[in-house]
Structure formats: structure tokens, C-alpha cells
Amino acid sequence: MSISLSSLILLPIWISMAQIQQGGPDEKEKTTALKDLLSRIDLDELMKKDEPPLDFPDTLEGFEYAFNEKGQLRHIKTGEPFVFNYREDLHRWNQKRYEALGEIITKYVYELLEKDCNLKKISIPVDATESEPKSFIFMSEDALTNPQKLMVLIHGSGVVRAGQWARRLIINEDLDSGTQIPFIKRAMDEGYGVIVLNPNENYIEVEKPKIPVQSSSDSSDEPAEKRERKDKVSKETKKRRDFYEKYRNPQREKEMMQLYIRENGSPEEHAVYVWDHFIAQSAAEKVFFVAHSYGGLAFVELMIQREADVKSKVTAVALTDSVHNVWHQEAGRTIREWMRENCCNWVSSSEPLDTSVESMLPDCPRVSAGTWKLYLLVTAFEYT
């Protein structure tokens, strides 16, 4: 007799029920019953997943999607928007498919930054060797030489990369809603140099090397009987571990490890690095920041570490739904005072645009973005 996958999923519930029952069989009997139940599970049947292979296209065309003239992602045959639940009852597979499409869109946005916005892709660290992990940012041709104005854009946390505000908006709304491209084009039209940070590109992933496991019997002078017992325990442990791994990772996805990028291992490090090597070196008399969500926290951390330099060069900061916290980040009084005068945080709200919103923190003013769906309203360019 085999037990179905659904029965296995219910198994933890059965165990919990057995543990809390009072007046039932003693622990030995419950353990015996549980072992009998587990012995009847057909592992081969269990692993016959309905989940298709995690093998997805590497182009938009392969996914049969394209951006139309309005910048909306649409199916090339049906004209329909993106469908997340491509396969019913396979959430993990659908999520992996969504992530694969997201990686393609990230590369697509990079191409738009270079081709449509005429930005240059700059590798960092600037002194990186050929073999070490690298990241990059994007800059306009005049980013370092424009004598008047420089605009710096910082996105939030998560899967987004340079040029994006929100992947979800790119996929479900359009490119103008989810990317920084409208900001970049308007800034350049109004005479700003532009630098686009890439604060989430903190590491590269490589396949984890397999570490050979040496048998205990090969390196032990213990008696044969003791070695046999230890080997038996080791084999049973390996069997349980393999079972767990087979259930957790049924398609044997590669185990990856992260190699962090020097001086850019976090959004905060990245902001400081780009400031030191690019923004601080720029000729612009006035520097303006637009920072979304965690980007606001990264800016505050930059201020804490480079307070005098930031005050001397930055004219104004437009934050959108910033998650910074001047108390937790231990921003000093002089920083808080400067932020009250030079920063503004537009937050998701149903109140009319620019209506004052109460804040518990004594830092910059908070005003309504005029919507709960924050499309990053263009207000920063009002500062001159």
C-alpha cells in the first residue's frame, strides 16, 4: 500500500495531534505507529511530481511576450497581459517562471538605458581585477562634467536593478510606471547630468563546489564493531538528509554560493562607493537625489558617513515611501535638521497630492503622493 503526497503533507498535523492527545497510548506505541506509517510511504511515487522542469526561455520572444507601443507587456498571440498562474496548482513553478521572466526584463531595461537614454554602463569597483566579482552603474555622458546640475536615482530593495522602480509595475502596468526611464529622460531634457545607482547588485552567484565526504572507516583506528555501528548511523543520517533534499529540491537545482562585490556588498556600501568615486568627483554645482523605499535608507546612511560632503554638494532630496529611520540609523541632530530643510518624503496616501502627512519622526516632511499605488510622481525636478 502506498500513501499519497497529500497524506504526507498532512503527516505533521497527525504528529502534532498525537503529541497533544492526553490519555492515549504511551510514547513507545505512538513511535511504533509512526514508524509503521513512514515505512509504507513509497518514495518513488512521492517524487513523481506534477511539476514540469524548471527550464524557461531566456528571451521575451521565447516567453511569447513583447512590449507594445504603450510600453505594456502583452502576449504576442493573444494580446493579453501577463498571466502568473500559467499552470494551476503549481505555485512554485509559476513563481520560478515569473522570476525567469523578471531576469529577462532586467536585461531589457538595461538595454533601454543604453539605447533609448544614451547612458553609459560603468563597471565597479573601478579598479577591479579581471577575475573578481563586479557590478555596474549607468551614467549620462555629462554626469561628471556638467557644471550645473546632477540627478542621482536610487531604487528600493528586492529584485529590482538599475533603471527599475518596481518589477511588478513593469510586468502588470507598463514601462513608464515601473522604470526610471521617464525620470531620466525628463532630467536630461532639463539639462541634468544623470547617475543611476544599482544598489541591489551586491554579489554574483556561482555553483557551490561539492565537498567529498570521507568515510569514517578510512581514517579511524577504532575497533571494527564500533566502526560498523558508526557507519550504519552515518548511512541512516545520509538517507534522511537525501530524503529531505529530494523533497525540498525535487528537480535537483544547483546549490549556489554568493561572492560579494568588493565595497559594494550592500545598498549602503554601494551608495557610499558611488558617492566617493563618482558623485563627489562631479563638477555639478547642485546635486539632486531621488530615492525610493530602501533607497532612502541608503541615502541617510550616506549622510551619516559623509555628512559634510553631502551638505556641501546636495541641494535637495526627493524620497518616495522611504523606509529610513533616523533613530535606528542613529542620525545626529545636524543631519535631522538638514533633512527637514532639504528633503521631502512622498508617501502612499489617499489624501490629495502634497497634503501634509503626520510623521512620528523628527526628520523630513512627509506629504501625500495622492495615491496608494505609488507611481513615483515626478516632483523632484521642481527643485532648482
Image (cartoon, rainbow, N blue to C red):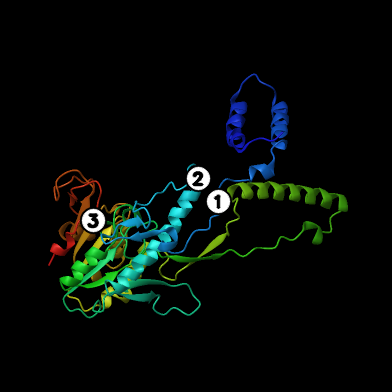
In the rendered image, the vertical position of residue 51 relative to residue 253, given as above or below? above
- The residue that mark 2 highlights is 90
Residue 363 visible in the picture: no
Residue 111 location, quadrant: bottom left
In the image, what residue occupies the spot 19% across and 61% down?
338
The count of marks equals 3
Alpha-carbon neighbours of circle 3 within 10 Å: few (<14), some, or many (≥20)? many
Disc number placed over residue 376 in the picture, else none: 3
Residue at 66%, 20% in the rendered image: 24
Answer with mark 1 or mark 2, whichever residue precedes in sequence. Answer: 1
| Kind of residue sitting beneath label 2 | Leu
User: Which quarter of the rendered picture does the N terminus lie within?
Assistant: top right
In-front residue for pair 146/50: 50
Q: Residues within 10 Å of mark 2 (few under 14, many from 20)?
A: few
Which type of secondary structure does the marked residue at label 1 adopt? Answer: loop
Q: In this rendering, would 89 be left or right of 120?
A: right
Q: Amino acid at mark 1?
A: Pro
Q: Which residue is mark 1?
A: 52
